[in-house]
Image (spheres, helix red, strand yellow):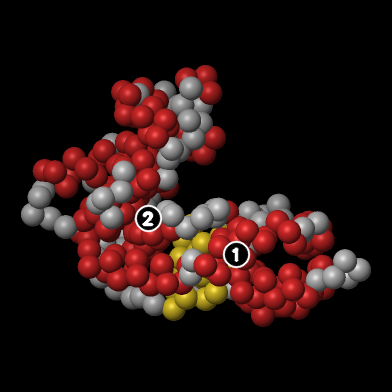
Amino acid sequence: MKIFSLYRDFFKFLEKVTTHQEKWDIYFSFYYQPHKEFFETYFSRFPLIDNDSLKQRVETIKISDYSGLKNLVSICNPEEIIRETYEKCTRIVLPKEEPNVYLLVGFFSPDGFVMNFRGKPVICFGLERFKDFSLLRILFAHEYAHFLLNLSRGEVPEEKQLEWLLISEGMAISFSSLVFPNHMLPDHFLFKRDRFNWCQENELLLREVYCSGKFSSKELMEFYDRGYPDLKIPPRAGKYLGFQAVKRYLGQHREENIGLLLSDKKQALSLGL
């Protein structure tokens, strides 16, 4: 596994900035240009962001806003955490090929995500989102599962995209809970306790919304991302159904390894919700 610590060049950019300089030229020279191919792929995920809007974002950067992150990585090495966690993950499921991991500072990135780069999935972390690294291990295990799913056999039919979203999230949650069984389940959902409790208490409502056919796939995708205030459904609550589907399967097939689900999209989709 290779780790690309792009964030270190972001700190170089910050160190070069003075109050009288344009930040964009320094950002481009010390951060964007050295990793141009990666950032062109990364920013293509945000079609509304063009060169001018990115430049405007860079020029409004406050160096003081990143002092906490700089201190955090100096006392808590994210590369070391990721290497240790990768070893734990491979004890559960070995990958067909080792992942590349990118640690960056962006403006729009989630905590962790998988994207295709140079024709292969890579694991990425937007460090600007972290106040501490208490859940970085769980988050890596979660994204490692998505990495395996990207490498898995088969395709996901267009009409199954919503179901795949929920099932794949359920598998990532289940996988991280196998790697770190001593953590509380809400941590694996990356939920606060109150949202997790809501999901447990309202599973029937979630099934009614996601499985009844009353709503279109487009509407359900929006509910997943933004929640559904009319029914007080919080964002991303739908992945609770995916987790329950994986949990049922593993409970009924105790002799089988979660690796079988992570290696075959058709098998994973056969679980249903």
Q: Which mark is residue 100?
A: none
In this rendering, the answer to whether 53 lies above or below 21 is above
Q: Which mark is residue 138?
A: 2
> In the shown orientation, is residue 128 left or right of residue 48?
left
> Can residue 223 be spotted in the picture?
no
Q: Which residue is nearer to you in this view: 188 or 143?
A: 188
Residue type, numbered disc 2? Ile
Residue in view at x 42 percent, y 45 percent: 190
> In the shown orientation, is residue 220 left or right of residue 70?
left
Image quadrant occupied by the C terminus: top left
Q: Which residue is nearer to you in this view: 118 or 173?
A: 173
Residue in view at x 44 percent, y 78 percent: 2
Q: Which sits earlier in the primary sequence, circle 2 or circle 1? A: 1
Residue in view at x 55 percent, y 74 percent: 5
Where disc 1 sits, the SS reads helix
Q: CA distance from mark 2 to mark 1?
A: 22 Å
- Residue 164's spot in the image, x, y percent? 36, 47
- Residue 127's spot in the image, x, y percent? 56, 61
